[in-house]
Amino acid sequence: MIQQLRWLALPLLLAITPAWAAAEQVRYHFIPTDACGTMTQVPAGPEGTIGELKRGLGVRSLPYPYAVRPNQMVTYRHPFTGRNVTVPIRLPDGLPRMETRADRIVYTRGEYVVETRFLPDGSVDVIYNAGFMRLLRFE
């Protein structure tokens, strides 16, 4: 019986593997440029690319050379520095659900998630997550 289950588990595992590869997450990094809260995007990915891509289980970072065209300029009060920062982000169409945590703000619309993480040095990471079995699409 156990031998038969092993033979069933192997094809199931192989069938699921392409779905892992399809899930995508991209991270961008912004640093403060002046006292007015202006943020500048700096390379966040390997090989000096503007973004860092993680696919599947996110074990290895890949270069992501594409910028995201923002549709919002959002001003936050940075929890570590206490200063206002204005971050360009691309929010999903429609009205996303917003969660506030101590060091981040999370916008969710369906499975699409945009997370703004505040770092102790005053910088901000913006992470776009397509959700399980989805590719990121920025139109």
Image (cartoon, rainbow, N blue to C red):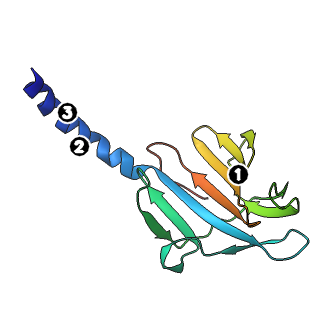
Query: At which x and y percent is residue 11?
Result: 19, 37
Quadrant housing the C terminus: bottom right
In which quarter of the view is residue 118 placed? bottom right
Q: Residue at position x 90%, y 73% from top?
A: 35
User: Considering the numbered disc 1 on the image, is that residue within a helix, a strand or a loop?
Assistant: loop
Query: At which x and y percent is residue 120?
Result: 73, 61
Q: Which residue is labeled 3 in the image? A: 9
User: Considering the numbered disc 3 on the image, is that residue within a helix, a strand or a loop?
Assistant: helix
* Above or below for 46 versus 100: below
Query: At which x and y percent is residue 121?
Result: 74, 67
Q: Residue at position x 75%, y 59% from top?
A: 71
- Residue contact between numbered discs 1 and 2, judged by CB atoms under 8 Å: no
Query: At which x and y percent is residue 117?
Result: 69, 55
Circle number at residue 91: 1
Distance from disc 1 to disc 3, alpha carbons, whole Å, reads 39 Å
Residue 95 visible to an observer of this rendering: no
| Amino acid type, mark 3 | Ala
Sequence-first tag of 3 and 2: 3
Sequence-first tag of 1 and 3: 3
Q: Residue at position x 84%, y 63% from top?
A: 85
| Amino acid type, mark 2 | Leu
Q: Alpha-carbon neighbours of circle 1 within 10 Å: few (<14), some, or many (≥20)?
A: some
In which quarter of the view is residue 33 placed? bottom right
* Above or below for 127 versus 106: below
User: Considering the numbered disc 2 on the image, is that residue within a helix, a strand or a loop?
Assistant: helix
Sequence-first tag of 1 and 2: 2
Q: Residue at position x 82%, y 57% from top?
A: 78
Distance from disc 1 to disc 2, alpha carbons, whole Å, reads 34 Å
Distance from disc 3 to disc 2, alpha carbons, whole Å, reads 9 Å
Q: Which residue is labeled 2 in the image? A: 14
* Above or below for 89 versus 103: below
